[in-house]
Amino acid sequence: MTTPTPAPVSAPGPAAVLPAQAAARLGHYAVIDVRTPGEYASGHVPGAYNVPLDQIRAALPALRAAATRGDLLIVCAAGNRSATARGELAAAGVAAATLTGGTTAWAEQGHALDRPENASRVWGMERQVRLAAGSLVVLGLAVGTRYRGARGLSAAIGGGLVFSALTNTCGMAAVLARLPHNRPRPADLDATLAALRQR
């Protein structure tokens, strides 16, 4: 009795793609930019769809459908958020790759970024976090000269930054992403998901 030969399993694509590799095959990817709408508007990989990280689960049906028609490439500013999104997609059985170094590396290597006309220039999330954290530390120290207990604010922010570095997460970024300038309008997200389904 012969044992049936198992069907060949296609090898999964690479977990990360270098900017030059992505540029050479850009037309083969559905590029998903998981930054906030403001960051996306400030400059994104050509043809990228904006699906903010906190909307990935809601977008799973559209992303799953797009993945059956081609490769998904997940992009953020530097690679952290895209790695998180890729993990969420993998847990849902959706294969995707990330862009090494994100849009920062993409632009540094001379590749063009698309910017909508009349788009407001919103700071990247990392810059927003640095401003918020620095401002809270300075506030804690300034108020702490009069009210000793206020120094605890500076200590808490410093501890939060250490925890953020150790865990490669950022609670402050999650909070800042909920501010109005960082949130997608429901109509915009619906239009993005509809275009992704029709891709």
Image (cartoon, rainbow, N blue to C red):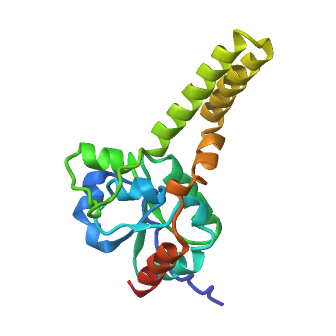
Left or right for 178, reference 78: right
Q: Locate the C terminus by quadrant.
A: bottom left
Residue farthest along the front direction in this orientation:
146
Residue 150 % position (x, y): 75, 19
In this image, 155 relative to 12: left or right?
right
Q: Compared to 47, does 75 lie above or below? A: above
- The quarter of the picture where the N terminus appears is bottom right
Q: Residue at x 45, y 80 (%)?
A: 191
Residue for point 26% across, 56% down: 113
Observer-nearest of 51 and 189 = 189
The residue sitting at 49% across, 66% down in the picture is: 51
Which residue sits at x=57%, y=74%?
59
Quarter residue 132 falls in: top right
Tell me where residue 167 appears, x and y as whole percent: 65, 37
Vertical placement of 191 versus 42: above or below? below
Most extreme residue toward the right is 149
Residue 75 in view here: no
